[in-house]
Amino acid sequence: MITFPISLLVNWQCTSQVSDLSSSEREWLFEPHSLTVKLKSRAQVFSVKVLSEKIFDLTLEQKALLGCEASTALNREVLLLCDNIPMVYAQSWLPDNQLSNQPKNPLHNMGDRPLGDVIFQNPELVRKEIEVARFDTEHPIQQLALQLNLPIQKLLGRRSVFSLKDYNFLVCEVFLPGAYLYS
């Protein structure tokens, strides 16, 4: 049984610290534009499966990473599927903006729409540095691979903090076994 949110505690590294990646791995991990668009271009049918969507307390590390004062955030966990094959596990942390008098955050009501389809349409979107991580065969993300009947293998992931005006949010993406990244 998987407990959400799936822990993504791992040694995240800045791009300058990562040197031993194949050209395919680099192409996917350092894609500066929408991963959703890139995946859609490779598939007949693209879909999103929501695994979990709940409010959680932010850790001190997450608050520092996001540079925010919010104490809670919506954690959204999804699978990005190409032709019904899970390619990417994505986790986003969307801080609660109850501290301000702003209207309800539209990113908190995505349903099964991909976050990438919404955020990359906004010309004010700024992506901070992409960080990369390796997930060994003992990492908790492997429980998801098992549940999806995918082979257990070392996985690669990336994360970025995005900004829309003064609103920062975190997106982490782990490429599952069989993802295009590994071809």
Image (cartoon, rainbow, N blue to C red):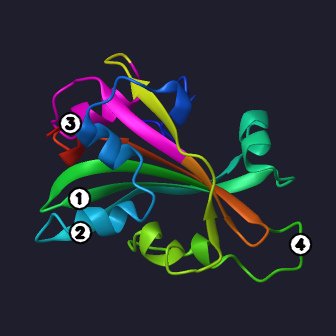
Q: Is residue 106 visible?
A: yes
Work out whether residue 131 or residue 99 is closer to the camera in this orientation and state it. Answer: 131
- Residue at horizontal 24 percent and vertical 43 percent from the top: 181
Residue 159: x and y in percent read 52, 44
Query: Is 163 included in the stretch rendered in magenta?
Result: no
The numbered mark at residue 23 is none
**Disc 4 or disc 2, which is closer to the eye?**
2
First reached walking from the N terminus: tag 1 or tag 3: 1
Is residue 20 placed above or below 46 in the rendered structure? Answer: above
Is residue 38 placed above or below 71 in the rendered structure? Answer: below
Disc 4 residue crowd, few under 14, some 14–19, many 20+, Cα 10 Å:
few
* Amino acid type, mark 1: Leu
Contact, CB < 8 Å: mark 1 with mark 2?
no
- Residue at horizontal 38 percent and vertical 31 percent from the top: 141
> In this view, which residue lies farthest toward the top?
138
The numbered mark at residue 177 is 3
Work out whether residue 61 or residue 158 is closer to the camera in this orientation and state it. Answer: 158
In the image, taking residue 161 as reference, residue 29 lies left or right, namely: left
> Dot 4 corresponds to which residue?
100
* Amino acid type, mark 2: Lys
SS at circle 3: loop
Image quarter (top left, top right, bottom left or bottom right) of the C terminus: top left
The numbered mark at residue 40 is 2
SS at circle 2: helix
Disc 2 residue crowd, few under 14, some 14–19, many 20+, Cα 10 Å:
some
First reached walking from the N terminus: tag 4 or tag 3: 4
Q: From mark 1 to mark 2, how far is it between C-alphas?
A: 9 Å
> Dot 1 corresponds to which residue?
81
Work out whether residue 156 or residue 56 is closer to the camera in this orientation and state it. Answer: 156
Q: From mark 2 to mark 3, how far is it between C-alphas?
A: 18 Å
Contact, CB < 8 Å: mark 4 with mark 1?
no
Q: In this picture, which residue range is highlighted in magenta?
A: 139-159
